[in-house]
Amino acid sequence: MSARNNVAPSTIGVDFVDGGVVVEYHDGREVFYHGPPEPVDGSLSTPPGKEVHVLVTDPDGVEGVMTYVNDRNTHDDILETTGVGRVMLDRDDEEELFPGVTVATEAYSIRVEADLSLVDGRVFVFAEDEMSEHAYELVESAD
């Protein structure tokens, strides 16, 4: 399998609908993420071995940027035509995806943290494989 590179995301369309979130790619395709997303206080470790997609929206939730974390299946040129980004992390690595949003490797999981005072919008994490789909929204602690 060939090496995969980091790809910068572009702004894409987002629509919140009954039962989930629709992401509208630049090439006209839409992807439906089942939900509604489960609220999680500020940080999250995904279930091990899942494909992880992080979506940061604008305050109105009509557009955003999506980044795939450690995706080894999608070719760079496909990502570039869809507007989706990708970040590849090494073991014990960390990367800032967006101001206030970081991702890090944690064993076989991905840890996503959001400082929501720095994010002017909403932060969603989708973790899935052939067996299950999980949708989360990082929110400020109720404390």
Image (spheres, rainbow, N blue to C red):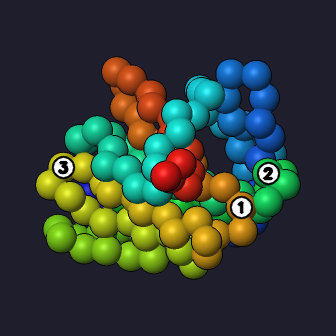
Label of residue 52 in the image: none
Q: Residues within 10 Å of mark 3 (few under 14, many from 20)?
A: few
Q: Mark 1 points at which residue?
A: 121
Relative side of 15 to 95, left or right = right
Earlier residue among tags 1 and 3: 3
Label of residue 108 in the image: 3
Numbered disc 1: secondary structure: loop
Image marks 1 and 2: residues in contact by CB distance under 8 Å: yes
Numbered disc 3: secondary structure: loop
Earlier residue among tags 2 and 3: 2
Relative side of 67 to 64, left or right = left
Quadrant including the N terminus = bottom left
Q: Residue at x 67, y 29 (%)?
A: 20
Inspect this view and state whether residue 72 appears.
no
Q: Residue at x 77, y 36 (%)?
A: 16
Q: In this view, does 25 lie above or below 7?
A: above
Q: Which of 20 and 30 is in front in this view?
A: 20
Q: What residue type is labelled 2?
A: Gly
Q: Name the residue under label 2.
A: 61
Relative side of 116 to 13, left or right = left
* Image spot of residue 27 (x, y percent): 76, 51
Inspect this view and state whether residue 12 appears.
yes
* Image spot of residue 124 (x, y percent): 57, 49
Earlier residue among tags 1 and 2: 2
Q: Distance between the residues labelled 1 and 3?
A: 28 Å
Q: Distance between the residues labelled 2 and 3?
A: 30 Å
Q: In this view, does 55 lie above or below 133?
A: below
* Image spot of residue 126 (x, y percent): 49, 42
Numbered disc 2: secondary structure: loop
